[in-house]
Image (cartoon, helix red, strand yellow):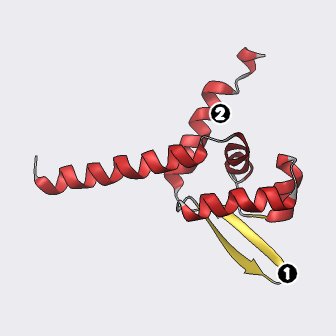
Amino acid sequence: MSDMTLLEKEEDIEKATRALKAMAHPLRLKILCALKNDELPVLEIVKQVGSSQSNISQHIDILRTKDIVESRRDGNKILCKVKDAKILKLVANMQAVFCTADDI
C-alpha cells in the first residue's frame, strides 16, 4: 500500500468525521433529509422541517461551513443542495436503518 493511498483514506476519514459531527443535530439531519432528492429554497426547507426561518438558516450556515451543503441565489430565493453524493448516500442509509416501517 502506498503512502498516497493512506493519505487519501485519512482525508476520507477526516471528511466523514466532520460530516457526522455536523449532522449530529436533529434539525441539521432533518434539513439533509429534506434535501435528499433535490435542491430546495430555504422557505421550502423551513416548511418541511418545521422550525423558524432564522433557526433553519443558522443550521444551513453550519452545514455550509462544514462543506456539506452549498447554496446559490436565484432571484429572491436562496436555493440549497447537498454538495456531495456520499452525504446523500449516508442520509439514505440512516433513514433505511432508523426510519423503517418495521419500527412503527
Label 1: few (<14), some (14–19) or many (≥20) C-alpha neighbours in 10 Å? few
Note whether 22 is above or below 54 in the view shown.
above
Q: Residue furthest bottom?
A: 75
Is 20 positioned to the left or the right of 49 in the image? left
Mark 2 vs 1, N-terminal side: 1
Q: Quadrant of residue 46?
A: bottom right
Is 83 positioned to the left or the right of 75 in the image? left
Q: Residue at x 88, y 55 (%)?
A: 52
Q: Residue at x 66, y 42 (%)?
A: 25
Residue kind at label 2, given as amino acid type: Gln
User: Residue 38 or 64: which is nearer the viewer?
Assistant: 64
Label 2: few (<14), some (14–19) or many (≥20) C-alpha neighbours in 10 Å? few
What residue is pinned by disc 1?
A: 76
Tell me residue 56's x, y (percent): 78, 56
What residue is pinned by disc 2?
A: 95
**Disc 2, SS:** helix
